[in-house]
Image: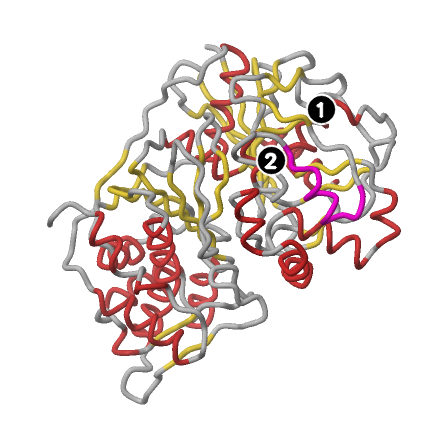
């Protein structure tokens, strides 16, 4: 049996999966946690990778490896390859002022025209400006900027602090596209945008194609044999899309630390309404994507407040009627990216003596979270990205309440792929490609959810709540109508 390994260095943890090359079947896995802070020493990601490899039983019998990871988060390196300072994660909101400044300097629409990215605080470019402004000494020392997956790939290839060899930094289109200084038209960096953000030039990882090999593993890495091929890797959503076999007409809703909705497109998207980011996928196509900062952690918070488990939260929610009898949660607990509300916080509206019950509160948490995600389907539709089927993945995808309530909020087919670590699996497929020159065809089992009556009141209620607080609403009630227009007739 030939084995390949995929590594997912996500926001919350590093996961390693070892797979059979022929079938994609998981043979063994390992996991190690990341710290909860949003500004982190990159060395913790490397140590977590080594720990996860050890917990997966090592990779001594593996023939190739690849890394995917959280997008956008920069790693700042000096000329010797040392980490200059801690890294602000994609979800650290400290870069909001930098984002505003960059939009003011260049023009919001110009960023979109040049990169396909409505600049957000999550993108790499505002993180560069943030460092330049808050820690100019570190910015001055920085000679190269990578993102997490680039840096871990570089380390796997035997590079280490003090060794230099910055020219061996490589990346892929998906990660380059998330920087906000990459052109979807040319496939190259737009270096004047990098310099605008950072105030100077620096070395950037070389962009590889989908079927390229990053290199081979270095010597002396615990649990990892030397000399095996290293795949090009990708951003987390690109890896998941690859593992799911995403086709045009499919959209994915991923409920993890963040909420993400994305679809596959053969052409780049430029959304001048400012919602959809034109990222690249792992195959050579594009992956128009919309994201929220608040997602599955909302459910953990709701369960904690009710003193119950996540399973009990789901049971409670299903006891309540659609709309939670008017109780409405806007779950902007850590601010929000879509809509752009970085300094706002969560709001519970319309509570009364009659409707403020445990079941209604449980359901309002799930409805509020899903309303933000469903609105993003409308954003894709407004960019003429067709969606005929929705795939639900992520840690919260197995919740019966999430499944039923989501199916009530859209009128297109909703399918739930079998539980798997899709980012790590996609990374393993890239490892297989590095070994064989092509992506393997690994089966994905999906279950289509029953289609309950469509309940437009849920999205309408949340749009009204946003309006009442002066927040931007989804244009044209997009949270409701696009799903109906795109779906087959029930």
10 Å crowding of disc 2: few (<14), some (14-19), many (20+): many
Up the image or down, 225 lies above or below 405; here it is above
Q: Position of residue 179 (x, y in %)?
A: 62, 42
The quarter holding residue 158 reads: top right
Q: Residue at x 42, y 29 (%)?
A: 242
Name the residue tied to disc 1.
222
Q: What segment carries the magenta color?
A: 189-200
Residue receiving disc 2: 176
Work out whether residue 397 or residue 254 is closer to the camera in this orientation and state it: 254
Camera-side residue of 96 and 354: 96
Residue drawn at 61 percent across, 50 percent down: 90
Q: x, y percentage for residue 358?
A: 33, 75
Q: Which mark is residue 74?
A: none
Residue at 33% across, 45% down: 384
Q: How is the image coloured?
A: secondary structure
Check disc 1 and report its element: helix, strand or loop.
loop
Place of residue 79 in the rendered image (x, y in percent of width and height, measured from the top left): 86, 33
Disc 1 crowd, CA 10 A, few/some/many (<14, 14-19, 20+):
some
Q: Is residue 191 magenta?
A: yes
- In this picture, residue 485 sits left or right of residue 433: left
Q: Residue furthest bottom?
A: 353
**Quadrant in the picture for residue 33:** top right
Look at the picture and state if 302 lies above or below 391: below
Q: Residue 153 at what x, y percent from top left?
A: 66, 27
- Picture quadrant where residue 121 is located: bottom right
Marks 1/2 in contact by CB < 8 Å: the verdict is no
Question: What is the C-alpha distance between the residues marked 1 and 2?
Answer: 29 Å
Relative depth, front residue between 200 and 484: 200
């Amino acid at each position: 049996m030939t084995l390949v390994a995929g590594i997912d260095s996500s926001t919350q943890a590093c996961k390693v999966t070892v797979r059979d090359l022929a079938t994609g079947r998981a043979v063994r896995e390992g996991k190690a946690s990341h710290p909860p802070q949003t500004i982190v020493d990159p060395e913790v990601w490397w140590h977590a990778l080594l720990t996860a490899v050890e917990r997966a039983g090592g990779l001594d019998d593996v023939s190739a490896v690849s890394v995917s990871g959280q997008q956008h988060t920069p790693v700042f390196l000096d000329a010797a390859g040392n980490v200059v300072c801690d890294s602000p994660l994609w979800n650290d909101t400290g870069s909001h002022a930098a984002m505003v400044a960059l939009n003011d300097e260049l023009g919001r629409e110009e960023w979109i025209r040049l990169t396909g990215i409505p600049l957000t605080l999550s993108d790499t470019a505002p993180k560069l400006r943030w460092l330049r402004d808050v820690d100019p000494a570190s910015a001055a020392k920085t000679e190269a900027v990578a993102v997490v997956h680039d840096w871990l790939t570089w380390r796997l290839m035997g590079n280490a602090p003090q060794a230099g060899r910055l020219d061996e930094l490589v990346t892929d289109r998906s990660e380059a596209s998330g920087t906000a200084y990459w052109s979807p038209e040319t496939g190259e960096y737009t270096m004047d945008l990098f310099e605008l953000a950072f105030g100077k030039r620096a070395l950037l990882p070389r962009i590889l194609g989908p079927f390229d090999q990053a290199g081979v593993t270095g010597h002396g890495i615990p649990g990892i044999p030397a000399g095996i091929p290293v795949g090009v890797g990708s951003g987390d959503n690109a890896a998941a899309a690859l593992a799911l076999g995403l086709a045009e007409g499919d959209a994915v809703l991923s409920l993890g630390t963040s909420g993400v909705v994305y679809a596959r497109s053969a052409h780049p998207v430029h959304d001048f309404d400012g919602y959809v980011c034109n990222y690249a996928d792992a195959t050579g196509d594009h992956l128009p994507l919309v994201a929220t900062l608040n997602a599955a952690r909302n459910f953990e918070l709701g369960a904690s407040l009710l003193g119950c488990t996540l399973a009990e939260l789901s049971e409670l929610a299903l006891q309540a009627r659609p709309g939670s009898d008017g109780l409405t949660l806007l779950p902007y607990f850590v601010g929000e990216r879509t809509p752009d509300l970085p300094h706002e916080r969560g709001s519970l509206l319309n509570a009364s003596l009659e409707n403020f019950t445990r079941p209604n509160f449980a359901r309002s948490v799930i409805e509020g979270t899903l309303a933000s995600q469903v609105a993003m389907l409308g954003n894709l539709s407004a960019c003429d990205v067709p969606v005929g089927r929705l795939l639900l993945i992520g840690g919260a995808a197995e919740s019966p309440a999430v499944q039923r309530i989501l199916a009530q909020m859209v009128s297109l087919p909703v399918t739930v792929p079998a539980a798997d670590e899709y980012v790590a699996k996609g990374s393993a497929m890239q490892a297989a490609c590095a070994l064989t020159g092509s992506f393997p065809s690994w089966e994905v089992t999906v279950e289509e959810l029953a289609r309950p009556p469509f309940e437009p009141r849920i999205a309408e209620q949340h749009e009204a709540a946003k309006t009442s607080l002066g927040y931007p609403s989804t244009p044209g009630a997009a949270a409701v109508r696009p799903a109906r227009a795109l779906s087959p007739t029930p």
